[in-house]
Amino acid sequence: MARKIKPEFAQELGSRLRGARLGLGMTLTQVAAACGGDHTRVSKIERGQFATVNTYVQAICKEVHVDPDCTDDASPQALHAKLEQLIRRKPSTAPALRAVFDALDRMAN
């Protein structure tokens, strides 16, 4: 069943979907084919240009392993999406972020 959502949630979910898709190494076309749609529709959803979580949005979520009801900013998908947005907006942050990841990795081992 489709449910209406607020524009800010559509933006957040779309961003998480894009981050998860990219994390899986999938293209828009691959996701669209797996879900029975076309790449332009998937692209619009990733940009938050939708008003309901319908069966197609749910199919995309399932394909890229994103919970459409989760709004946890600390989820791996949410963090990946935020990092991707940051690097896209300001590519010069990439080396600093890499250093942070390397330091965290050393701490974890």
Image (tube, grey):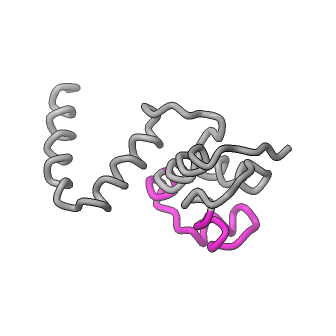
Total label count?
0
Compared across the picture, whether 33 is left or right of 65 comes to right
Query: For residue 25: magenta?
Result: yes
* Coordinates of residue 86 in the picture (x, y in percent): 31, 53
* Coordinates of residue 17 in the picture (x, y in percent): 55, 52
Using the image as rendered, state which of residue 66 and residue 53 is in the foreground. Answer: 53
State the residue at coordinates (19%, 54%): 93
Query: For residue 6: magenta?
Result: no
Using the image as rendered, state which of residue 47 and residue 61 is in the foreground. Answer: 47
* Coordinates of residue 95 in the picture (x, y in percent): 14, 53
State the residue at coordinates (69%, 69%): 33
Whether 9 is drawn above or below 89: the answer is above
* Residue that protrudes farthest toward the front in the picture: 7
Image quadrant for the N terminus? top right
Compared across the picture, whether 79 is left or right of 106 comes to right
Whether 99 is drawn above or below 27: the answer is above
* Coordinates of residue 87 in the picture (x, y in percent): 28, 57
Magenta-highlighted residues: 20-44
Whether 95 is drawn above or below 37: the answer is above
State the residue at coordinates (61%, 66%): 44
The dominant secondary structure in magenta is helix
* Residue that protrudes farthest toward the top in the picture: 108
Image quadrant for the C terminus? top left
> Which corner quadrant of the image does residue 5 belong to?
top right
Compared across the picture, whether 104 is left or right of 16 comes to left
